[in-house]
Amino acid sequence: MSKINQNASLPPAEVDPVDLPENAFRELGADEEYRPVMHPAHDYPEVTPYSVTMGLVLAVVFSAAAAYLGLKVGQVFEAAIPIAIIAVGLSSARKMPNALGQNVIIQSIGACSGVIVAGAIFTLPALYILQATYPEISVNFFQIFLSSLLGGILGILFFIPFRKYFVKDMHGKYPFPEATATTQVLISGNAKGAKAGAQAKLLALSALVGGVYDYLVATFGVWAESVTTTAYTWGQALADKTKFVLSCNTSAAVLGLGYIVGLKYAFVIFAGSVFVWWFIIPLMGTYGPESITAMAPASIFAEYARLIGIGGIAMAGIIGIIKSWGIICQAVGLAGKELRGKSEEGTTVRWQRDISMKHIAYFSAIALIAVFLFFWFGVIHTLWQAFIAWLVVTVIAFLFTTVAANAIAIVGSNPVSGMTLMTLIVASGVFVAIGLNGTTGIVASMVLGGVVCTALSMAGGFVTDLKIGYWLGSTPRKQESWKFLGTLVSAATVGGVILMLNHVYGFTGPNALAAPQANAMAKVIEPMMLGGQTPWTLYIIGAILAVLLNWLGVPALAFCLGMFLPLHLNTPLLVGGLVAWFVNRSSKNPDVVKERNDRGTLISSGLIAGGALFGVFAAITVLCGVEPPTNNNEFTPQVLGLVAYAALIIFVIRGSFSSTKRS
């Protein structure tokens, strides 16, 4: 257990601040250092019976809830922010001293739920879906459990060597929108004094506004969730003739996300979306074969254009690995140095102390051996085919680890489904080449996809946890160590829930669970294993485009993410980025600008937090029998959507300007 720090015993200059330092979100100067909220030279209560127990309880609860809602409704809510809100609420109710470090651990352990659920339900239910057509396909609890568990462990181990690079060396260079929002929630529980109290109230007010706003839309359809030109006669005629569409999600959470992402990355992401929706889709829809020209723009995007983005994301990942080769070599060299008994751990401050690279090397070897044995004895049963499958998993999971982390750091959205789809395609091609096809190949591909999907989901989620810990001053080693237990508990919970849901509802039939991602995976894998076609041309176009973007100095991953994500989710990112740009140029006084931007960031964090929390309530309300809104494209909801969205933008701007300083 950690030694409790008493602030009163510290020199006055070292009394812990109650708020984040002013340089928390910007790049540091040449001789400037970042000093987190919890002093790096002192110990704090972090891993305690309370924090571990609460973290595990919330991991179980949110794993079950996220799996159920994700398979029933088709959306996996992000658990990190609701868990942080619960942790702060409980510590405040109990009037716990020194609660910040413990709340970070609660959030870190509990957040395993969301990432493990995403990895499992995107892939493994596809086996049940295909089982209806091919009864010889079998799936059991241990396949689901071990696929999720081993994938999560690989994601943790593969990312730890990159922690310092992403969270420390790149300080201020990435926006980390989700980590920013979660950190603001956690620091609100640390509030003391008038200023800190005002910030906590502003965060709570923004969360309430954002939560109620999104709840009214998602549950009752008071106004349109997405405004689109196709809701109007002229817009529909334009879409039919030219395939041109403009749409924007009116969610408060996505607007807040765009503000924190900032104009630079939001513009690049939107540019990728524009390239697909205003160039590729109209081109294919106008000059393509009749089978494509007859399709709606959204169908062309889903069936064809989006695949270009998948190829681009894959190539951006390879480019990222090449650029990060020095970092990889440094991590491997450090592990080798520690294996020879030359550890530098004693010179590392608590705040930057990871699990030693020597132990990471040992644990990685054990985990990879376990994956191989799982494939050999539990899935494929042929030694050399199991080895090939193991090799594919190892290479792809490691290569895409940095892609997942980059995506989360930039936009807060992990393209794990796209990367998993690419994994399934590559793996299926390899399996067919070595004679592993038919239903046996289907099972092997989907279980392999589950391992990779969970590994990438974990890597993306883990960078958020560690960035939160960096800003607040937690001990990375403690976050990393206890993440394994959270992964174990979440994997067991998800495995049990999937089996139960299949028994109660099933994944095929009239009352089956939706499971949209798993259905998409099943649709892709079935023809490949049974003699279908793969759209390699579209993937190659995306890969070439990523190379050209990198050559031109454009962030390839951000651009390709825009190509992969729907237009209506990328447009509000640009709107939020423009709001941030306006706030940052609203005065010539730098002190005024800083205070306004800080308030804008706090308000946006509240919108994200409220949207995440009330999103859970909205899904539960729908499950209780309230019919989801179906009037999105009607005239009145569209107009109300524009009015409500404009009011929300004004709320953010006015709230940012309501500071004590004036220009």
Image: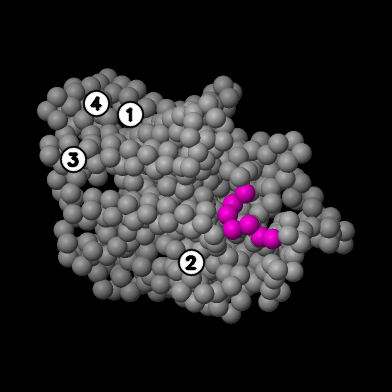
Q: Is residue 59 above or below residue 608?
A: below
Q: Residues within 10 Å of mark 1 (few under 14, many from 20)?
A: many
Confirm whether residue 216 shows in the render. yes
Task: Specify which label sits upstream in the sequence, 3 or 1.
Answer: 1
Mark closer to the observer (4, 2)? 2
Q: Is residue 19 magenta?
A: yes
3 and 1 marks in contact (CB < 8 Å): no
Residue 32, given in percent of the width and then of the height, sits at 73, 41
- Look at 52% across and 35% down and name the residue there: 592
Q: Amino acid at mark 4?
A: Lys
Which residue is under mark 4?
A: 243
Q: Amino acid at mark 1?
A: Trp
Which region is colored magenta?
Answer: 15-21
Which residue is under mark 3?
A: 640
Question: Mark number for residue 88?
Answer: 2
Which corner quadrant of the image does residue 58 belong to?
Answer: bottom left
4 and 3 marks in contact (CB < 8 Å): no
Q: Amino acid at mark 3?
A: Leu
Mark closer to the observer (4, 3)? 3
Q: Is residue 67 above or below residue 426?
A: below
Task: Specify which label sits upstream in the sequence, 2 or 1.
Answer: 2
Q: Residue furthest top?
A: 287
Task: Specify which label sits upstream in the sequence, 4 or 2.
Answer: 2
